[in-house]
Amino acid sequence: MQFMLLFSRQGKLRLQKWYVPLSDKEKKKITRELVQTVLARKPKMCSFLEWRDLKIVYKRYASLYFCCAIEDQDNELITLEIIHRYVELLDKYFGSVCELDIIFNFEKAYFILDEFLLGGEAQETSKKNVLKAIEQADLLQEVRHMCFLKICRISVLTQ
Amino acid sequence: MPAVSKGDGMRGLAVFISDIRNCKSKEAEIKRINKELANIRSKFKGDKALDGYSKKKYVCKLLFIFLLGHDIDFGHMEAVNLLSSNKYTEKQIGYLFISVLVNSNSELIRLINNAIKNDLSSRNPTFMCLALHCIANVGSREMAEAFAGEIPRILVAGDTMDSVKQSAALCLLRLYKTSPDLVLMGEWTSRVVHLLNDQHMGVVTAAISLITCLSQKNPDEFKTCVSLAVSRLSRIVSSASTDLQDYTYYFVPAPWLSCKLLRLLQCYPPPEDGAVKGRLVECLETILNKAQEPPKSKKVQHSNAKNAILFEAISLIIHYDSEPNLLVRACNQLGQFLQHRETNLRYLALESMCTLASSEFSHEAVKTHIETVINALKTERDVSVRQRAADLLYAMCDRSNAKQIVAEMLSYLETADYSIREEMVLKVAILAEKYAVDYSWYVDTILNLIRIAGDYVSEEVWYRVIQIVINRDDVQGYAAKTVFEALQAPACHENMVKVGGYILGEFGNLIAGDPRSSPLVQFNLLHSKFHLCSVPTRALLLSAYIKFINLFPETKSTIQEVLRSDSQIRNSDVELQQRAVEYLKLSSIASTDVLATVLEEMPPFPERESSILAKLKKKKGPGAVSNHLLKTRKACLTDIKGISTPSPSADLLGLRAGPPVTAAAPSAGSLLVDVFSEAGVNDDGFLRFVCKNNGVLFENQLLQIGIKSEYRQNLGRMYLFYGNKTSVQFVTFTTTLNVQAKPVEPLIEGGAQVQQVINIECLTDFSDAPLLNIKFRYGGALQNLTLKLPVTINKFFQPTEMASHDFFQRWKQLSLPQQEAQKIFKANHAMDTEVLKAKLLGLGMALLENVDPNPENFVCAGVIQTKAQQVGSLLRLEPNAQAQMYRLTVRSSKDTVSKRLCELLAEQF
């Protein structure tokens, strides 16, 4: 996988992970182009498209688009399930995840992704093992409680 | 449990994020961000030492601001400080910041590497994982240099925790991708391969990605992985859906690992060991059988995971291309998917079938689905699926169905999406040419193409139809008749006028017997389009007219009248005016004999690779051309036998070099062919001269600058030719060079050329090229132009011949790290040995044969002559055809020379 982008229906980028070296300018250009391309597609269209010399695999969950760029010989369907497994991980960790969780806890979203995918390849596909790694890390830290009101929680998984 | 209570809330961060979200406008957001940046900066600069928590919070805020798309120019030091914190979350945020924001050139890299080193040796698995994640995320060369030796040790050590092994494997993969030369598996190879046997499925999942990548580059060293992969796969495939516990995904056992195993096997030919092969075939059959079983779940995740394995298995079957039975079963399975209600499956089936079409075993089976595919082309609602259908039609086309497929593609073109029209046009043109049994069908098809999608018909397509008509006399009469009819349409595309003008100019006589297409009727028809056409087409038509005068003397006075008219002979366009004047003169002073010789019919074009095919390849990117794997859909576009005869000089247009012109008719050749010559645009002019001495350095509408140069020892002489391409004088023409040069004539008449000589002496080695500034007035306007003169250090090379032994001895002598420069880069051009040799010779060094043990590699030796000193240089170029990459190593007695040569050469191949 070359990169993964999460963006909202309004085109706001929520998470970006790059597995190939690119300049900031290129990253911005790619993001702009891809967000536009994907948002322009209709709901029933297929989840794969060719873009430059890459294959784009994307899926929408509630208000969020998950979009991966893979190489020619990579498998589209399994990438689609990579996206789904990541969504499940987020869901399990945050407890019915919504876009707001990813906005306010963006660093957690990155940590979970790093446990699941590394260098663009699946590192650990067991949900239990990934969450165990993250929760262990949570136990290691000082516990600080914080109250925060979440309004309009729309779970990502109940699309 | 409310999610945010998990982990550590950073209240200040949450408040900041919600402030940003509440901003009503971009300006308000920027204002809020600037306020925050000022606050953070003052905190970082303040006298009070910040505690770890605050530091973490501010670094996290900076990261958030950066991810919003703003630039961050401070905070790096604080992030690096966090790396050495003992608190996990602080360390974690520090690493995250570094992973996202630190570029490899940063001065901080030393400090970062230090922190990583500490964590790697900490024996604390969570810290080790964080450090490995950071290396994998940054993946810079500096990190590879620092850690590529250590990580394999961690990966195979017996006491390493599983999670650390997983990170280490993928970390190494990332480093291998950025710096393959630094990651040496050597002694670890067999232990890494044996990770495929690891008890922990997660370790296997991670390790296999690394093994696959390494196998692609060094298949022999890793070939023991094949039997291990087969037995692992067999165990997974035959396990019940619950056996693998958490590695079962929606009732599918280990889908990710299965796909990766099947992918790894695609790096190798079918196993030679009968037992291993039998076991593998059994696995593939099981996978195909499972596709027919009723689903264990209605969830799309279940079918996706199952089908992901199925498609990967089919890829492997296609890769082996040796089991007719499996190939046909694969084809039938894909045939079912072609009509599946899931768009995704239809898309993938079309894509996968494209590669099946190129196998001799399954080609016929694929062809049986032609009606379904044509239907998909017509009815699919998603353009990307239609595109796949068009690709598949192209791939399954052969002599038996070419007419049907071409007709369907032509009719699809009328409504096709703009984004894919050009590619469709190229494909139709190629199929029509490749499968033309009678060339009248070919001519009809191309003319239809121009009629339906004229705007998308590139020059290559109409050049090619002309080439073919000229080379085949059985179709010339038909072609003349058909273009004549096509031109009758009240509105026809300019490309049609071009083809018409050319063909009637050559073969109009073949239909002139019919009074409905008598010479004058033909001429009037062509001339009725003249005023609507652009300058290049008009120029072509003028050439057709002079050809008419030769073919049909009775049209001479009419045509001379036209040429003589003010709109031709005084045309503001210099090219048209020149043609009108010359053709008029030629027709009035030359005798019929001379005229007949000068305007003789064009001789046949030499048979070369189809220019259209080259164009399609180019569209598909350089990688696709030499990609010999039939696996990829793109590869089948190039699988066109019979016409691909790559020649080292193959330019894109088979036509551009023009036909061999007979001595008797030099002007005829150039007159008619010059329509096709195209101004070389060369903003990269400089780099094109590294390996050659003569040519056109620059050209635009007004001015052409040619160069001839010669070099001996440390001296050189360069002749610059400034050609005025317009009909108007250039006045106050000056050139200044940032070194001394003789002045040049201040005036260049329209159409004239002046010459300037520059004497060059190389005093010492250099990197920057001299700049040439050119100023002149054209009309009233001042033109100003600065060019790099193509004087590069390699021009002062004296080739040195030496034997293998001497070469390696000298190579070893130049072993200081700074004496060597190395670059690994992607091939920009076809990796043709002859072309490479020619370029290396052009470089000025001696190309040494039989020196490198690997015959694929090139080694060269030479001495650069400067006034101050002589610099001996050795060069080694290692092409990797499979990866389409080169590794270039230069060693010189002077470091700046190595570096410069390496830079210059990296752009040449």
Image (cartoon, rainbow, N blue to C red):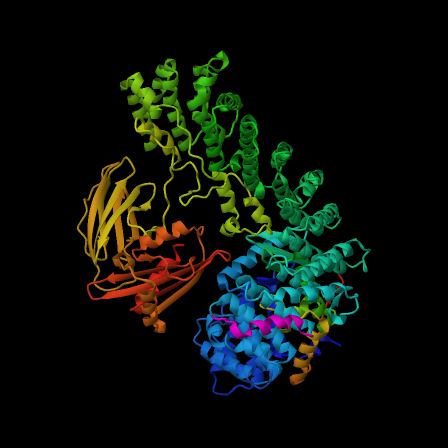
Magenta run includes residue B112: no
Camera-nearest residue between A95 and B639: B639
The furthest residue to the front: B274
Main secondary structure of the magenta stretch:
helix
Camera-nearest residue between B723 and B4: B723
Magenta run includes residue B198: yes
Q: Position of residue B887 (x, y in %)?
A: 43, 62
**Which residue is at a point 18% across and 49% down the rendered structure image?**
B743
Q: Is residue B592 above or below residue B379?
A: above
Left or right: B107, with B704 as reference point = right
Left or right: B681, with B120 as reference point = left
Q: Which residues are magenta?
A: B182-199
Report the quarter where the C terminus of chain B lies. Answer: bottom left
**Which residue is at a point 60% across and 52% down the rendered structure image?**
B631
The furthest residue to the bottom: B48
Q: Position of residue B592 (x, y in %)?
A: 31, 16
Q: Is residue B739 above or below residue A104?
A: above
The furthest residue to the top: B515
Quadrant of the rendered image containing residue B678: top left
Quadrant of the rendered image containing residue A104: bottom right
